[in-house]
Amino acid sequence: MQIDLNGKKALVTGGSGGIGRAIVRTLAECGADVAVHYHSDSTNAERLVSELKASGRNAAAFRADVTKEADVYRMRDEMAAGFGMPDIIVANAVIQYDRTSLIDQDIKAFYSQYESCVMQMVYLAKAFVPHMQKQHYGRIAVINTECSIAAEPSFSAYVAAKKGLDGLVRVLVKEVGPDNITVNQIAPGWTITDKEREKGIEDTSFYDAQVPLRHRGCEQDIANMTAFLVSDLASFVSGAFIPVAGGRVMTAI
């Protein structure tokens, strides 16, 4: 048994970032052609596209601000004209911000997180789901976070936005299911990426002690789960919220 995405086209938002790059590479290794979305990191996006093309996959980079409706529609039109419409969407992009207590948190952070989490998904759905409905097939993977369950201090804006995203996704699951479109969420724990490796991985023993597996995961762990959920091996899985966090958080039943 293997994950086979041959003949499929995928769009990964935030595809030039740490987790995004691993997802892009993994989907390509499984046979998908991949559109790499980026906001400002054109260098890494184009380098990734060149890498994928060298391996024999079709790939292209697309710039857009996913918090802006017009930008997402423009990206859709550019993809339709030169790459093709995606069968798979991975909503991974998010705005980074400086975290502090709710009382001290800049109000702008709450708006930016809502826009990059909830509204990104709204715009992606409006732009790309009609095509999936027309072809009666689609796979959507949404990157959430273990913080939605852990709800720890200083994460108020992030948690509020990701909780809102969770509610939106649950509605979408029921609306598009009849069109043979699955929608699932992946909730990473505190994930090791190349950015941290380049800086030097800090001592996170305080966090590791809270993880039953006693270590942090890496971006490939997230990519592996993503590839499974967007494949036909998971054709009857929809509405799932799956932590990839070593057991640190668990969903309720």
Image (cartoon, helix red, strand yellow):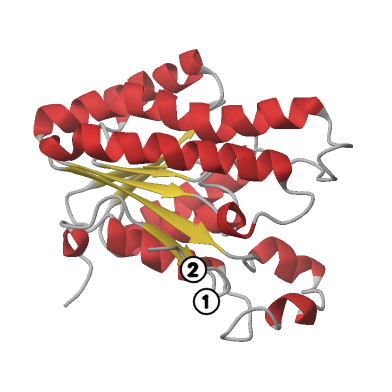
Name the one closer to the observer, 2 or 109. 109
Dividing the picture into quadrants, the one containing residue 158 is: top right
Dividing the picture into quadrants, the one containing residue 129 is: top left
Please name the amino acid that badge 2 sits on: Met
Quarter holding the C terminus is bottom left
Q: Residue at position x 41%, y 34% from top?
A: 168
Residue identified by numbered label 2 = 250
* Cα gap from disc 1 to disc 2, whole angstroms: 6 Å
Quarter holding the N terminus is bottom left
Image spot of residue 251 (x, y percent): 45, 63
Image spot of residue 170 (x, y percent): 35, 41
Name the one closer to the observer, 132 or 213. 213
Q: Is residue 242 above or below residue 132?
A: below
Secondary structure of the residue carrying numbered label 1: loop
Q: Is residue 172 above or below residue 15?
A: above
Q: Residue at position x 48%, y 16% from top?
A: 69
Contact (CB < 8 A) between labels 1 and 2? yes
The label on residue 247 is 1
Name the one closer to the observer, 226 or 195. 226
* Residue furthest front as drawn: 253
Q: Is residue 214 above or below residue 93?
A: below
Image spot of residue 134 (x, y percent): 12, 27
Q: Residue at position x 29%, y 59% from top?
A: 229
Please name the amino acid that badge 1 sits on: Gly
Which of discs 1 and 2 lies nearer the camera? The answer is 2
Is 26 left or right of 179, judged from the image as shown? right
